Amino acid sequence: MQETSTPTVAPISSGRWVLYISILFLGIIVVWSAILFVLTFFMDRSITHLESEVARVNHEIEVASQNKDIVTAKIIQENSLRPTIDLKNIVTNFRLAAIDANVRFDGFSISKDTISTMLISTEPSGEHPDPVSTIIAMMNKYSSTEQKFRLWKITSISGDSTERKTSIELKLVQTLNK
Amino acid sequence: MSNQINRIYVPVILALGLIWAIFVLRPAYTSYIDTDTKKVDLTTKQNDMQKNLDALISLQTSINSSGSSEIAEKVRKLNQGWDEAKIMTAIMLSDYTKWNDIVPPSISISTISIDKGKKLPSGLSFGSITLTLSSDSIDNVVDFLTYLTSSSSYIFTLDTIQLPITAPAQKETQWVTLPIELGVYYYE
């Protein structure tokens, strides 16, 4: 009976392994360096392109920024101009408010968003003959329902049972426009 | 023999690798990181600048557009600058204040005084105008002041005003003479 002999691979000595690993280590470092150099090279080229783009855009911004219209428009956008009042609309609502409350307003002084005026009442409201009842009815109405103006608190009233007077302040509600 | 060769080459290769890593790979890596950071910064800067430029172009388009946008109207009014003649024309030669053939104006201005004012921190300037006007109707005064602050060729402001208005409106004609203070925005 003939014995079958399996071919044996000569074992690599440990010294040779160390040599291979060292060469592999050196190879990896060299290849890695080469890759980094190549990547850096292409990035440098793209940076050069980006720098020229930035310079171009910067130049265009400078040119546009020197345009007087643009400068003014930017100021308007970045700052709010002092609000101006729609006087006609306010005066109309002011007059309607007097008719609605059955009182008289004498004088019209507006500052910021508040109207100051003298409220005069000569007509009583309801059964009570004192016209102060009309002022009180107006106070109740303004405190309970939304009106064109907000009536500032009335804390004093003068006069007699034929005519009652008080200084009032009416605050504008959404009537200021820019 | 082979082991003797390995003993010579392995330290040499390792030393060479170490030297390469220190003097070639490390600077290459540092350079790569620096370049990458620079590229990211530049890209961000370019994007921001492009946005600014696009905003400016859009602004310019809205100003130059044929339709009269609100901002274009304000720019046109502000860019007239401080011109006494134009300001006086806007106030004194308006439809309310100028004579039409033989019809007297609804508003008569007896005195006008204009002051260039000062430059505001925003870059705009703010002047002041004091005038004394007369009219046979307070409603004409209200209409005139509403016109000045909304439709005239300058941006006039009217923050504080006192008018002899009664409500309900009096029917009879009432001649009124009033001092008025206006503000005016301009750019120069």
Image (cartoon, rainbow, N blue to C red):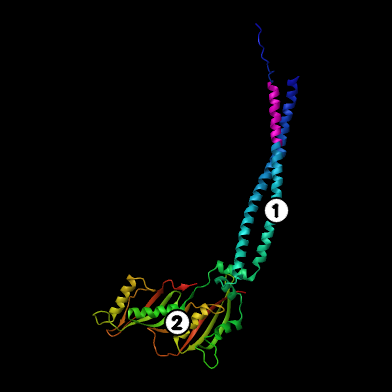
What's the residue type where badge 2 is placed? Gln
Residue B76, horizontal then vertical, whole percent: 59, 74
Identify the residue shown where x is 31% and y is 79%.
Answer: A157
Does B118 appear above or below B27? below
Chain of residue at mark 2: B
Please indicate whether residue B67 sits to the left or right of residue B171 in the image: right
Q: Quadrant of the N terminus of chain A?
A: top right
Q: Is A114 on the left-hand or right-hand side of B117? A: left
Q: Which residue is mark 1?
A: A49
Tell me which chain the residue with mark 1 is part of.
A
Magenta includes A16? yes
Q: Is residue B132 magenta?
A: no
Single out the residue that lies furthest toward the left. A127
In the image, residue A95 sits, relative to residue A73, either above or below, namely below
Instruction: Residue A25: name its quadrant.
Output: top right
Image spot of residue B27 (x, y percent):
70, 42
Q: Specify the quadrant of the image occupied by residue B118.
A: bottom right
**Secondary structure of the residue carrying numbered label 2:** strand
Q: Which is in the foreground here, disc 2 or disc 1?
A: 1
State the image quarter where residue A30 is shown: top right
Disc 1, SS: helix
What residue occupies the far bottom of the structure in this picture?
B102
| Marks 2/1: CA–CA distance | 64 Å
First to last magenta residue range: A13-30
Q: Which residue is mark 2?
A: B162
The front one of A8 and A171 is A8
Amino acid beneath label 1: His
